[in-house]
Image (spheres, grey):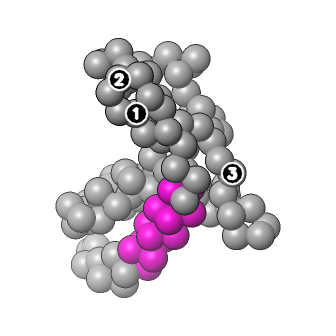
Amino acid sequence: GGWSESYRSCVDKEYDGSPEASFGTGGSGVVQTAWALLTLFAADVSAPKERDAVERGVAFLIAQQQPNGDWEQEGITGVFNRSCGITYTGYRNIFPIWALGRHHEWRDNLPQLC
């Protein structure tokens, strides 16, 4: 239900979809899923298939949230100079919370399907 991409895509300058490059749960990461959701909300998606993708992503974020409200640190979320990987520890909480908040707003403003 989520999205992900390995830092190796930045290093190799091409998408790395191999199983070795995936991380998180089932190959999906909370930070990348939150980024994808925020992008979909900014694009104001509303078609049925788009709604379904959004709801699966939101369900993934909720399922990954820990009892204390935190999310697990999953892996490298930033690369610069093609050689330095960074884990921004705040990202795992900032972006999922932001995406869940935007989801609430998005859902309340969806046009009704006939």
On screen, 17 above or below 109? Answer: above
The residue at 53%/21% (across/down) is: 21
Tell whether label 2 touches label 1 (CB within 8 Å): yes
The crowding category of the residue bearing disc 1, from other C-alpha atoms within 10 Å (few below 14, some 14 to 19, many at least 20), is: some
Q: Is residue 95 magenta?
A: yes
> Element under label 2?
loop
Residue 79 is labelled as 1
The residue at 35%/23% (across/down) is: 82
Visible residue check, residue 103: yes
> Element under label 1?
strand
x%, y% of residue 30? 55, 51
| Amino acid carrying mark 3 in the image | Glu
Residue at the disc numbered 3: 72
Residue at the disc numbered 2: 82
Visible residue check, residue 96: no
Residue 79 vs residue 97: left or right? left
Q: Is residue 107 magenta?
A: no
| Amino acid carrying mark 2 in the image | Arg
x%, y% of residue 100? 48, 70
How would you classify the magenta stretch by its main secondary structure?
Answer: helix
On screen, 11 above or below 51? Answer: above
Q: Which residues are magenta?
A: 91-104
> Element under label 3?
loop
- Name which of mark 3 and mark 2 comes first in the sequence: 3
The residue at 39%/74% (across/down) is: 102
Tell whether label 2 touches label 3 (CB within 8 Å): no
What is the spatial separation of the Cα atoms under label 1 and label 2, in whole angstroms? Answer: 6 Å
Question: In which quadrant is the C terminus drawn?
Answer: bottom left
| Quarter of the image where one finds residue 110 | bottom left
The crowding category of the residue bearing disc 2, from other C-alpha atoms within 10 Å (few below 14, some 14 to 19, many at least 20), is: few
Q: Residue furthest right?
A: 67
